[in-house]
Amino acid sequence: MIELHHLNASRSRRITWLLEELGLEYKLVQYVRDPKTHLAPPELARIHPLGKAPVLCDDGQVLIESGAIIDYLVRKYGQGRYAPAPESADYNRYVQFLHYAEGSAMLPLMLKLYTGRLGEGGAPLQPRIESELKNHLGYLDRELAGREYFVGGALTGADVQLSFVAQTALRFSGRDAYPNLTAFVDRIEARPAYKKAIEAHGA
């Protein structure tokens, strides 16, 4: 059986959601952040030396990185769902967004989070961080104009991967700054599988 090592308040909630979308049986091993440091507990390092979540164990394999896990689950269990066909015109767009979420979009969001904890010490970096946030979030908002999802007309793994970016964007920027991202977040959070994952395992 699939085993997912899941950390609360982390990007691994994307994987619990995808597992529910796919209708797969899985075992969840849950970890809780240290309330003072906000770091993952050391027990996670027993599963993978980086000590990060998510970690997926399946068929003797141990996989890290949300994008790689999403790609694996969609290829192995998707049965043609949640990704365009490789020969289709949408496939390159799908792969682009699957990698873009962590490769580019998350960096200014994480810098905003970490420098925000520095108080005045992080102030000199804020103009550049805000500029990058507007650049990336504005791009994503425009890419959703006239669309319900980032690729094609149905939910794909790219949407699952970008969900954390969009949700974090709303946390930092509010619901009015990027209306298409806001509508996207409302849409995915209304999905039965998303609700089931959150109700079962939390965010």
Image (tube, rainbow, N blue to C red):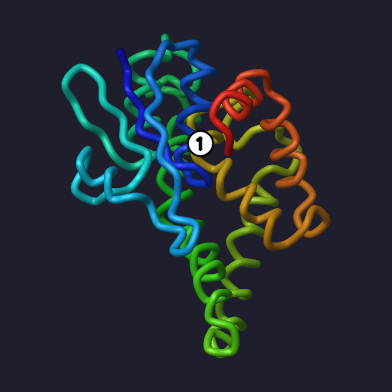
Task: Write the residue at 70% across / 54% down.
Answer: 170
Residue in the foreground of this view, choosing between 139 and 3: 3
Q: Position of residue 150 (x, y in %)?
A: 60, 37
Residue in the foreground of this view, choosing between 175 and 10: 10
Quadrant position of the C terminus in the picture: top right
Q: Which residue lies under the disc numbered 1?
A: 13
In this image, 142 relative to 200: left or right? right
Q: Position of residue 34 (x, y in %)?
A: 43, 55
Task: Write the residue at 71% across / 38% down.
Answer: 184
Task: Write the residue at 38% across / 19% down.
Answer: 27
**As drawn, which residue projects farthest toward the right?**
176
Tell me the element at label 1.
helix
Count residues near mark 1 (Cα–Cα under 10 Å), then give few for <14, some for 14-19, many for 20+: many
Residue in the foreground of this view, choosing between 76 and 1: 1
Quadrant position of the N terminus in the picture: top left
Q: How many marks?
A: 1
In this image, 58 relative to 144: left or right? left
Task: Write the residue at 36% across / 43% down.
Answer: 53
In this image, 4 relative to 105: left or right? left
Residue in the foreground of this view, choosing between 76 and 199: 199
The disc labelled 1 sits on which kind of residue?
A: Arg
Above or below: residue 191 compared with residue 138: above
Q: Position of residue 189 (x, y in %)?
A: 69, 32
Q: Position of residue 191 (x, y in %)?
A: 68, 23
